[in-house]
Amino acid sequence: MEGLFGLVLNIILTIYLVIDSRKHGKSPVLWGILGFIFGLIALGIYLIKTNRKVIGWIITILSIIGYLVLLLIIILGAALILGGGFS
């Protein structure tokens, strides 16, 4: 279910970036691909590049923090599952 949510979110971001990039004279193909692959980080960078810096930086920083927390949870979970534990 979570994977489906992420996929739908990236598709929505891709559609937004393709449509909005045309309005700002940016490459819709480039921003569509970046939006689909990198999601919220690409959206944040796009907003910074199109002079919507405050919301762009907020989205970029929060998404990087979110990815780091997710990575930490995965690493700690893998360590516990593999029996390494914390002793």
Image: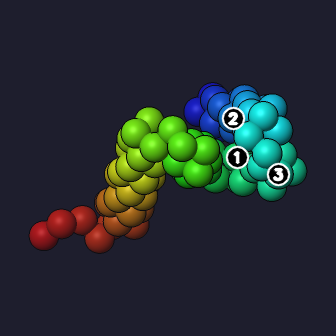
Q: CA distance from mark 1 to mark 3?
A: 12 Å
Residue 87: percent from the left, percent from the top?
13, 70
Quick one: SS at disc 1?
A: helix
Q: Amino acid at mark 2?
A: Leu
Residue 18: percent from the left, percent from the top?
81, 38
In which quarter of the view is residue 13 placed? top right
Q: Earlier in the sequence, mark 1 or mark 3?
A: 3
Q: Is the N terminus in the top left, top right, bottom left or bottom right quadrant?
A: top right
Instruction: Check the image and name the residue furthest to the right.
Output: 29
Of residues 62 and 27, the one drawn nearer to the viewer in this rendering:
27
Residue position for label 3: 27
Residue appearing at x 54%, y 43% in the figure = 51
Q: Amino acid at mark 3?
A: Ser
Q: Amino acid at mark 1?
A: Gly
Against 14, residue 48 (above or below) is: below
Task: Tell me, yes or no, if residue 11 can be seen here.
Answer: no
Q: CA distance from mark 1 to mark 2?
A: 6 Å
Residue 71: percent from the left, percent from the top?
42, 58
Residue position for label 2: 13
In which quarter of the view is residue 10 placed? top right
The circle drawn on residue 8 is none
Against 59, residue 82 (above or below) is: below
* Residue 73 shown left or right of residue 6 in the figure: left
Residue appearing at x 82%, y 51% in the figure = 27
Residue 53: percent from the left, percent from the top?
46, 43
Of residues 70 and 79, the one drawn nearer to the viewer in this rendering:
70
- Closer to the eye: label 1 or 3: 3
